[in-house]
Amino acid sequence: MNRAGGARRVYLDWNATTPPLPAVIDAMAAAAREAWGNPSSTHGVGRAARHRLETAREAVAALAGCDPRDVVFTSGGTEANNLALRSAFDSAPGTLVTSRLEHPSVTRVAEALEREGRARVRWLRVLSDGTVDVEDVERALGEGGVRLVALQAVSSETGVVQPVDAVRELAARSEARLHVDAVQAFGRLEATGQGADTRSVAAHKMRGPKAIGALVLRPGVALAPVLRGGSQERGVRPGTLDAVGAAGFGVAARHAQTGPERWAAVAPLRDALEQGLARLLPGARIHGAAATRAPHVMNAAFPGWGGPELVAALDLEGVAVSSGTACSAGTAEPSPAVAAMSDAATAASSVRFSLGEDTTRDDVDYALAALGRVLGRVPGQ
């Protein structure tokens, strides 16, 4: 919660992005002054930038439980997902197994690979609780020709935790590669897809800066570059790397190593929000309530309301929430995950509230009071 120009603001959109830690801002400011050189240059100015870069790589590796050599820096989770998917189909076509629960940087790449004739996409059955059907994963793998299974660790829209361990065992048995989009899991949950062939991470989802992330590899996994150019990141991801962003990423990654305990403490606040909603709107549908969820996310359907309309009304009350993915081409597109587990109309009336480690009970009470005022109006007025 903060006050801008005297107006109270309650931020409940942590899944879209997180407020950067003060220590992250300080580290980036110091790097901008002292390590602005090109990390590929061999002189002292370049070496100072390279030092910030490699220090950050070590911090991300410690968070991911891997060797620093298996961390490839990217511009964020979207690029990491693109790199993982496209790389798997660089040398030969095959089948990509995934679901409509995934982030657009997975589903839209899957669609593009199919249009290009590089992959056949096998869309998985989605259960009503918001998880993929593990039995359908097994069926898909049994159909043969699967090169890659792509599965998120936790849904950005509903907070539903996916059965990554079960899918990993099935993929390994079929000798298919497994990519886990762990962007919403790192720093929040213990389950981040450890053992997957590739995993995505984004700094700004864990109190770091935007425009930097990483693809974490299992030892021995080879990648084919999507971009062509220089030899940075062993030629897998060419382009001059930003030591300033990396400095912030490193601080955020170190903070995230102790994150799961802090985020678990948010669960009572999320529960209080859901209980308050039930009082305001009896029979309100909480998406994924029957599944294991991340402790900080509530996604609910508000019959009679349009999600974007409700988001706008709450914003006027000083409460920031969202009605769809933050990466849906700048539009207020309904959550594809909610549509996959219910229907398009329900998704269009749904709103996500995502809390964070700085959220207080006072913030939740303020949000509920604002929600009560909004729901007391006639939709559209």
Image (cartoon, grey):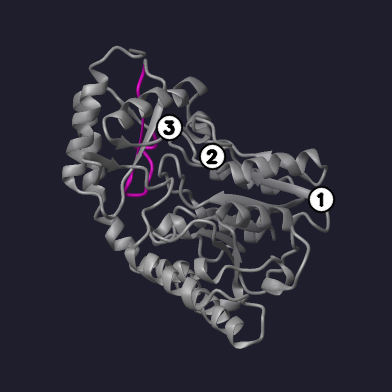
Distance, label 1 to label 2, CA atoms, is 23 Å
Residue type (three-letter) at the residue carrying disc 1: Pro
Between disc 3 and disc 2, whose residue precedes?
2
Pointer 2: residues within 10 angstroms few (<14), some, or many (20+)? many
Q: Look at mark 2 in the image and give the residue it sits on.
A: 101
Q: Secondary structure at mark 1?
A: loop
Whether residue 274 is situated above or below residue 312 in the rendered picture? below
In the visual, does 372 lie left or right of 165?
left
State which quarter of the image contains the C terminus.
Answer: top left
Between disc 1 and disc 2, whose residue precedes?
1
Which stretch did the figure color magenta?
A: 287-303
Q: Look at mark 3 in the image and give the residue it sits on.
A: 323
Q: Which mark is residue 357?
A: none
Q: Say which residue appears at 75% left-offset and 70% top-offset.
A: 230
Distance, label 3 to label 2, CA atoms, is 15 Å
Q: Is residue 37 visible?
A: yes
Q: Nearer the viewer, residue 98 or 199?
A: 199
Task: Quadrant for residue 261, please give it.
Answer: bottom left
Q: Say which residue appears at 78% left-offset and 62% top-offset.
A: 228
Q: Secondary structure at mark 3?
A: loop
Q: Secondary structure at mark 2?
A: loop
Q: Look at mark 1 in the image and give the residue it sits on.
A: 93
In the visual, does 233 lie left or right of 326?
right
Circle nearer the viewer, 3 or 2: 3
